[in-house]
Image (cartoon, rainbow, N blue to C red):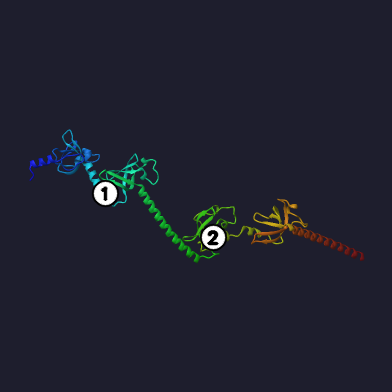
């Protein structure tokens, strides 16, 4: 059993120094502090705010009783009351620093809270300890205002740890880099998977679809040069702008919307290049052909001269159709150029010689229209002359009959 003399001897042998970690026992709780015995010739004093952060008598006293064991840190020599100044908070911090390397060893990232902007970066709190994030490690891009990160929870990785110097440095940039790399890898993997699925779908499509076939599709996108239409899952073909409408003045976006269903004509299948050419125009009758149906070979119609060519004149017949009068069909006599006898805007009567719907050409003639008109006049004239001769003969016969009576 230890005697009073031995205890006093141990107390006298204890060499006290600031920063020392000691084990203590609570003696009492006063109005100002927690008094402890830690085996030294003087008792120790722990202020309430050194017992717990922000502590007061009201918050600390109910949780502490004489006989409680506690680990403390010497932060100052004896005070005016002859008590050694101790801190529970700083002892716990020191212990935390010692355990920190082991705690962080297996963690790729940890959560910290931004404290305040300082020169060169941001101080942060981790498990009650203060660490630091250099400004260059706060983000992938340059950070103009470090204060934006104050009070924020940040996911970081460890850059440096030195328990002896209480140095703890983190990086948020490295975490963001890894996240970006992971996203890029996942995106590439997903893209490769989609590309493989699309390739398989396209191979099947070339076996399923045939040129000249009409199928229903869904417009997936509209671009300046046309529209992409999905005709089977993951299989798209292009309706080139020239195949959207017979009216070249309109744009695809003027007629259709993304998501709209349309019937398309399979114009071409290029398995080697993996391309499918589609057409909407092919399913519609050419307005030129529709309008040209009103013209029959032999018809004489009226048109307006709109332009000249070295070998003839172009005549507008209606809103959709134009025809050409060859220079040999403009006048009966030989002419050097069409403008010798015609004017732009002049209305002319022309006879339809040919209607070529395949090449969209209508051949016209002024001379034959005139010939037809002259023949018609001649027939009319001869018809009237014959009637007059018949009337005169009948009257002479009547007169002769009267004379015989």
Q: Which residue is mark 1?
A: 101
- Report x, y in % for residue 277: 54, 60
Number of on-image labels:
2
The residue pinned by badge 2 equals 278
Which of the image's four quarters has the C terminus? bottom right
Q: Which label belongs to residue 169? A: none
Query: Viewer-proximal residue, 182 or 308?
Result: 182
User: Is any atom of residue 294 visible in this view?
Assistant: no
SS state under label 1 = helix
Left or right of 80 on screen, residue 268: right
Pick whichever of labels 1 and 2 is earlier in the sequence.
Answer: 1
**Residue 100 picture location, percent across and down:** 26, 48
95 over 279 or under it: above or below: above
Residue 185, percent from left and from top: 39, 55
Give the secondary structure at mark 2: strand
Tell me the CA gap for discs 1 and 2: 66 Å
Q: Kindly report which numbered mark, 1 or 2, lies closer to the viewer in this rendering.
A: 1
Residue found at x 52% / y 56%: 227
Q: Is residue 11 above or below residue 385?
A: above
Q: Is residue 161 left or right of residue 372?
A: left
Q: Can you give x and y, in whole percent of width and height, for residue 2 in the image?
A: 8, 44
The answer to whether residue 393 of the structure is visible from this angle is yes
């Amino acid at each position: 059993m230890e005697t009073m003399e031995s205890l006093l001897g141990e107390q006298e042998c204890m060499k006290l120094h600031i920063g020392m970690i000691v084990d203590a026992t609570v003696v009492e709780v006063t109005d100002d502090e927690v008094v402890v015995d830690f085996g030294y010739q003087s008792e120790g004093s722990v202020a309430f705010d050194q017992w717990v952060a922000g502590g007061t008598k009201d918050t600390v006293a109910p949780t502490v009783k004489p006989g409680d064991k506690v680990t403390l840190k010497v932060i100052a020599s004896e005070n005016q009351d002859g008590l050694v100044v101790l801190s529970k908070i700083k002892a716990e911090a020191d212990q935390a620093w010692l355990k920190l390397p082991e705690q962080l060893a297996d963690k790729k990232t940890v959560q910290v809270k931004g404290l305040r902007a300082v020169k060169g970066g941001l101080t942060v709190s981790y498990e009650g300890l203060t660490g630091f994030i250099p400004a260059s490690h706060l983000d992938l891009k340059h950070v103009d205002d470090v204060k934006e990160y104050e009070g924020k929870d940040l996911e970081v990785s460890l850059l440096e740890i030195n328990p002896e110097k209480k140095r703890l440095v983190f990086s948020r940039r490295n975490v963001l880099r890894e996240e970006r790399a992971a996203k890029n890898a996942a995106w590439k993997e997903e893209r490769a998977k989609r590309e493989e699925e699309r390739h398989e779908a396209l191979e099947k499509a070339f076996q399923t679809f045939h040129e000249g076939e009409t199928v229903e599709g869904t417009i997936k996108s509209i671009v300046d040069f046309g529209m992409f239409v999905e005709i089977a899952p993951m299989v798209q073909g292009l309706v080139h702008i020239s195949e959207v409408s017979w009216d070249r003045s309109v744009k695809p976006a003027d007629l259709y919307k993304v998501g709209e269903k349309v019937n398309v004509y399979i114009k071409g299948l290029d398995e080697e290049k993996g391309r499918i050419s589609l057409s909407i125009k092919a399913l519609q009758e050419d307005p030129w052909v529709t309008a040209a149906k009103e013209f029959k070979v032999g018809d004489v119609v009226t048109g307006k001269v709109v332009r000249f060519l070295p070998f003839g004149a172009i005549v507008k017949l209606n809103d959709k159709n134009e025809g050409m009068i060859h220079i040999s069909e403009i006048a009966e006599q030989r002419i050097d150029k069409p403008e010798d006898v015609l004017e732009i805007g002049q209305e002319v009567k022309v006879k339809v010689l040919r209607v070529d719907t395949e090449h969209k050409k209508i051949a016209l003639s002024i001379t034959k229209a005139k010939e037809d008109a002259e023949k018609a006049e001649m027939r009319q004239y001869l018809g009237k002359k014959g009637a007059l001769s018949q009337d005169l003969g009948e009257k002479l016969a009547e007169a002769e009959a009267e004379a015989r009576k």
